[in-house]
Image (cartoon, rainbow, N blue to C red):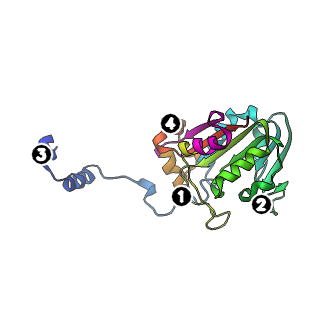
Amino acid sequence: MPISLGIWDRLPLSAQRKLRRLLQPAWFGGLRRTTPLSSRWGSDRGNPIDRYYIEQFLQQQRKDIHGRVLEVGNRNYTQRYGSDVEHCDVLDNNPDNPQATLLIDLENAEALPSSQYDCLVLTQVLQFVFHLRPCLEHLHRTMRSRGVLLASVPCVSRLDLAYGEGKDYWRFTASACKLLFGGVFGADQVSVYPYGNFLVSIAFLAGVATEELSQRELSVQDETFQFLVAIKAVKE
């Protein structure tokens, strides 16, 4: 039997909350668990959701991936989205990476050469750099005039221990990225692109893959539930 509005308003707040839980119980389905469906960000179920948005962003900016390019970890995205690429260096601090051409830690990026690159590709990397401002200043220095930095950073993600325990430092918002990158490149030279929504954020934490969500669910953009931020910064 429905409760009339007058009676409902006279109930104490604690009673209203209890009644709401009884009348509209939370349904978690297969997510009522304390561990995710996948411990590998959904890569064992399909394409990780963060990669869906990263690849969408790089596809839209592919004209900027040209000339001399620097990519972190491997050259996969340069090969996939680049055009008229003269050369691609791979930056890593892991000497066991066979693709690495520059063994440099971004935490000590002063070793980067100056005025070398037309494009830098840094996807899901900067959360592992504690001293972000000096790192961005060195990245700016290593770029040629009109060079473009294409980066992505997480807003919502589990901790990644692949770089060592205690090395995953940051989660970002679009506002923070605009100020952080704008302080180095100039506010007018920075564009930020927040992606995601409530469902996407929950799904990624649970280890759900892109293929398990619909295009409609993936396409909804809710700035109050930013899941990932992509950044384009241009060196004047």
**Residue type at tag 2:** Asn
Residue bearing mark 1: 37
Q: Place residue 39 in its image quadrant.
A: bottom right
Q: Quadrant of residue 170?
A: bottom right
Q: Which residue is mark 4?
A: 220
Three-letter amino acid code of the residue under disc 4: Val
The type of residue carrying mark 3 is Ile
Q: What residue appears at the point 75 percent right and 34 percent down from the top-left corner?
A: 64
Judge left or right: residue 97 versus residue 132.
right
Relative image position of residue 61 (x, y in whole percent)? 70, 34
Pointer 2 residue: 93
Work out whether mark 3 precedes mark 4 in sequence or the reverse, and give the earlier one: 3
Q: How far across and how far down the image is residue 41, in percent?
A: 60, 55
Which mark is nearer the camera, 3 or 2?
Answer: 2
Circle 1 SS class: loop
User: Foreground mark, 1 or 3?
Assistant: 3
Q: Amino acid at mark 1?
A: Leu
In 3D space, how far apart are the residues under numbered discs 4 and 1 (Cα atoms)? 23 Å
- The local crowd at label 4, few if under 14, some if 14 to 19, many if 20 or more residues have their Cα within 10 Å, is some
59 sits left or right of 112 in the view = left
- Using the image, tell me which numbered label, if any, was put on residue 7: 3
